[in-house]
Amino acid sequence: MPRILSKEILAPDVVRFWIESPHIARKRKPGQFVILRTAEGGERIPLTIADVDRARGAVSVIVQGVGKSTRQLNAMDAGDEVLDVAGPLGRPTDLHPGRRVCCVGGGIGAAVVYPIACGFKALHGRVVAIIGGRTKDLVILERELREVADRVVVTTDDGSHGTKGLVTDALQALLAEGEVFDEVVAVGPLPMMRAVVEVTRPLGLRTTVSLNPIMLDGTGMCGGCRVSVGGEQKYVCVDGPEFDGHQVDFEELSARLGAYREDEAASLLLYERERLAAGEPA
């Protein structure tokens, strides 16, 4: 079984793992993801491959502990083994040489835009990154993005780090000051991606979003990750995860994401009670 090589806490409830997976490390391209299970009968968790170390045969994933399964994963430590890691899955990012790209990452979305930024930079593009969080402690991968991007803008809702405001405010400011982009890549909470799309739509500026809906098998068979793009049904696991943001039906996607919210909350509550009963921190 794949072994966790290292664990690093990046922010409250946000953990970076390096996991053994030589086959995936060899084949992964920017934009692709894995599906991971911690134990038999456990939920299949889709996670973007944030980085690879081919020398060690390892992949990096960044996990935000939101529900039961992600909190179970974040409770694991270096040396522990996960049941399985399937991948690389999904279509790679459509990279083109010499493009001027703005990579916008809201919260944990920075983990997705980081490998995309690396991919464009490797092809001699100009990369500007905008990352944001509610507060300073929730901004992740700033150092890593500064190492690869030509320019990095940080925003926080409360002004505790970088510029006070939203990532969309920063994007509008860059455009107003004359920055020219061939493409914007936006990844983060659904409302944030939708807001970025509405900034770029009037400009006709190509905008790519990376989606992470409910997903089970990762092969297009279950249909759980259906999304409407340009009036057509697409499957995020095989047709995505990246799509033209101007074509995505965000209203429908938002409704689908909330379909199991009550069940997820009940599962998390039971998990926390079990941990407390066992004398473990919730």
Image (tube, helix red, strand yellow):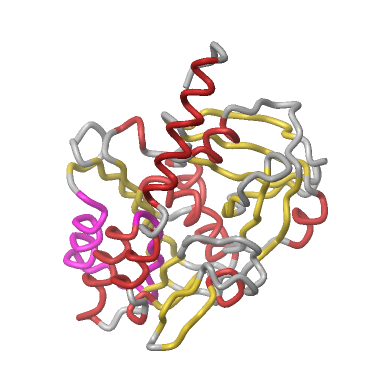
Where is 103 relative to 14, above or below? below
Q: Which quadrant of the structure image shows residue 87?
A: bottom right
Q: Which quadrant of the structure image shows residue 240?
A: bottom right
Residue at the image position 44 percent from the left and 88 percent from the top = 232
Residue farthest to the bottom? Answer: 231
Residue at the image position 26 percent from the left and 74 percent from the top = 200
Does the magenta segment cover residue 56?
Answer: no
Residue at the image position 68 percent from the left and 40 percent from the top = 38
Residue at the image position 45 percent from the left and 54 percent from the top = 149
Front position in the image: 18 or 152: 18
Q: Position of residue 151 (x, y in %)?
A: 37, 53
Which region shows up in magenta? 166-189
Q: For this view, does 267 lie left or right of residue 205?
A: right
Front position in the image: 77 or 42: 42
Where is 43 relative to 138, above or below? below
Q: Position of residue 29 (x, y in %)?
A: 66, 64
Q: For this view, does 140 lie left or right of residue 28?
A: left
Q: Position of residue 158 (x, y in %)?
A: 18, 36
Q: For this view, does 174 lie left or right of residue 258?
A: left
Where is 9 relative to 60, above or below? above
Front position in the image: 181 or 223: 223
- Quadrant housing the N terminus: top right
Q: Which quadrant of the structure image shows residue 264?
A: top left
Q: Position of residue 247 (x, y in %)?
A: 36, 82
Front position in the image: 249 or 131: 249
Give the number of callouts: 0
